[in-house]
Amino acid sequence: MATQMVDIEGQSSAQTSSPPSIFNKVDHPVTLKFEEVVYTIKNKKQGWIQKKKNHEPTEKQILKGITGMVLPGEMLAMLGPSGCGKTTLLTALGGRLGGKLDGTITYNGKPFSSIMKRYTGFVTQDDILYPHLTVTETLVFTALLRLPKKLTTQEKITHAEAVIDQLRLTRCKNIIIGGPDLRGVSGGERKRVSIGQEMLINPSLLFLDEPTSGLDSTTAQRIVLILWELARGGRTIVMTIHQPSSRLFYMFHKVVLLSEGNSLFFGKGSEVMDYFNSIGFSPSVAMNPSDFLLDLANGISPDNSSYGDQNAVKQKLVLAYKSNLDENLKAEVVEFNDDENDVLHNKKHERWSTTWLQQVMILLKRGVKERKHEFFSTLKIGQVIAVSFLCGLLWWQSDKAHLQDQSGLLFFYTGFWGFFPLFQAIFTFPQERQMLGKERSSGIFWKFLVRIVYTSF
Ligand SMILES: Nc1ncnc2c1ncn2[C@@H]1O[C@H](COP(=O)(O)OP(=O)(O)OP(=O)(O)O)[C@@H](O)[C@H]1O
């Protein structure tokens, strides 16, 4: 099997022609509109004793009517305190939220569809990557899986190389991703690899959940700058972000401020301070706008930094939004005609994903690369030696004439070599769950099958 494997590192470094500039412009621009988005969840049922005591409502509203619009070439930042509903809104807009979702979300005037899914990239907060693959291997395997089958393997590798260049990952392209117990690329580089995986399909819409969390401000700025360049190519970019520095804040074209599922502001980042000033909230000292906005969303008024009347401040801000911005915004969203330029839905699309056999083969190769270190791990060799030693002791100088003894040994060996690989395979299922979830959304369904096949070797 090892001889069949594609030497990805070798092939990619052998590539001499300059990578195509596939990222300059997007082919199918998308306008994202969302009106009165409400998301409700059912509260978990309590035990019958608790149920009698507490009369909690059975449902909880996470999003309470959020409206907005993002045009191609724009970058929207969702701001708000922890638990205000940013990730929920992002997931809803990315077409990944199940459950009770009311309101309207449209992409060029149409609801979410499989065509839209193909042109949507989603970068989750946690980077789900294989720790033992290098940056190049990670991106090349993704390219082989996600790019249309009309492209040759070499062209797909060239695309992956182009992404590496674009994301300035060239210096670390041969370094492994790494994990909690394994040194690898830095946090910022890992985040760029995750973004690169989504960029490979040249998405029209890109969603990112906290792409800068845990990074220093320079690295965070570098990542937002890359996203800004992507937006300049006509992409629609939506991200959640916790507390951007003022340099970052002014890079966003639009900002939505959330508080407990309510919208407190939606509009241009450059206008947010003027808006809050106009309704009587202005910072007493010069401060980072995002700090100021987070204080407001937490109900901390600039003139009264005591924590007494937070609910009253929040209520005031919600009412101010409803009377000053909500109606105009809804009218703007309804009036905007995005049907005319809808190249995406008007064009005939080929079914371009790879066949299941190709997927199985690529996943098999990737699985072998990722787990080859386990095949001859000291632990596994130690386990086999220990079992062999015990068997040796038990059957030491056993009489060859005793056929039952010999068949017992054979029975034990057959059982051991049958179940030993089987248990290895079973324990990979929980480890692979996250990756399966991530890749299922890209249409890769054959992973479990492949896991069983190659772990049983
Ligand atoms: N399935 C669920 N069941 C119960 N509560 C949920 C569920 N999903 C989300 N919530 C609640 O909804 C609220 C919003 O969650 P969400 O993850 O969107 O917040 P967030 O603003 O992204 O927070 P953070 O910035 O900390 O990631 C939280 O209070 C969370 O506990």
Image (cartoon, rainbow, N blue to C red):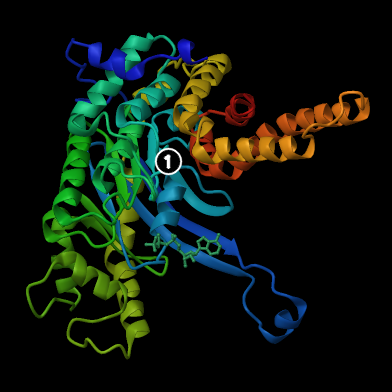
Residue 97: image location, x then y, percent: 52, 48
How busy is the neighbourhood of tag 1: few (under 14 within 10 Å), some, or many (20 plus)?
Answer: some
Between 392 and 213, the one nearer to me in the picture: 392
Mark 1 belongs to which amino acid? Thr
Residue drawn at (30%, 36%), measured in percent from left and top? Answer: 193
Q: How many marks?
A: 1
Disc 1 target residue: 106
| Left or right, residue 77 beside residue 108 | left
* Image x and y of residue 453, in percent: 63, 24
Is 227 situated above or below 213? above
Q: Is residue 252 visible?
A: no
Residue 428 location, quadrant: top right
In this orientation, which residue lies closer to the viewer: 262 or 346?
A: 262
Residue 345 in the image, given as x and y percentages of width and height: 42, 25
Q: Residue at x 76, y 30 (%)?
A: 413
| Picture layout, residue 89 above or below residue 295 | above
Q: In the displayed structure, would residue 128 be above or below residue 247?
A: above
| Residue 323 location (% of width, % of height) | 31, 69
